[in-house]
Amino acid sequence: MGKVKFAGRQIGLLHFPGLVHLIVVLVVTGVEILGLTRWLQLVSGVALSSVLSPFQVVSQIQQARDALGLSVFAGVFLGLFLLVEHVIAQMDQTGRIVSGREFFEIIGFSTLEVVVWAVWLFLIPVNGLVAFVFFLAALFVEHQITDNVKKGQPFLHFARVGSRVSRGLLVFTIFEVVGAVLWLGLGSVIPLAVGSTIEHYIARNVGQIRE
């Protein structure tokens, strides 16, 4: 993988971030996987009590599900997990508590990611190829926005085509997309876990590259 100087060091896409940061990568991966697997159960019609097991389902949660409808409730459910994941990743990247502006930006791209996953799932039975292309392109954009927020850049700034940043974004987006496709195709969470881990590992390194 290509390398670039950052803060006096050589940072490559597979640069080892250190044990503490690696643990953070594994934590955010776990949060994302838990959110996605439970979300899929919800939209597939699995009982709320089973999805939230071993947590006790309080009546307010069931009422919220009934009031919002299945799809919206499932989206909010997933969004909460993605929000936690992104806040942790942001603090790990910057080394400080997120600011108010960053928090609202994180809410924005977390919501976007929920929409991307939901539309992808909807498109799969319609046209598998269209679903794949949409998923890849939309997640690439979401990942670019996430990287911008980490670096304090404009929300809709796009890295130069062919740059190390854009190549890095594309690489880890492909890993996540392939992992997700195999997750549904094989009915196993292992590909999702592998793809998500690689995604977060490389994303942290990309977050240190400025061009």
Image (cartoon, rainbow, N blue to C red):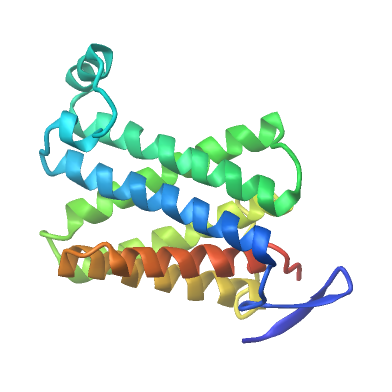
User: Which percent across, then down, holds residue 159?
Assistant: 64, 67
Q: Position of residue 89 (x, y in %)?
A: 60, 50
- Residue with the most extreme front position: 54
Residue at x 59% of width, y 32% of height: 104
Q: Left or right: 158 with respect to 26?
A: right
Q: Position of residue 162 (x, y in %)?
A: 61, 80
Q: Is residue 20 above or below residue 61?
A: below
> Relative to 60, is 93 above or below?
below
Q: Is 151 in front, or is 189?
A: 189
The quadrant of the rendering that contains the C terminus is bottom right
* Quadrant in which residue 160 is drawn: bottom right
Residue at the far right in the pictured view: 8
Q: Residue at x 21, y 37 (%)?
A: 51
Q: Residue at x 73, y 65 (%)?
A: 208
Q: Nearer the viewer, residue 69 or 22?
A: 22
Q: Residue furthest bottom?
A: 1
Quarter of the image for the N terminus: give it.
bottom right
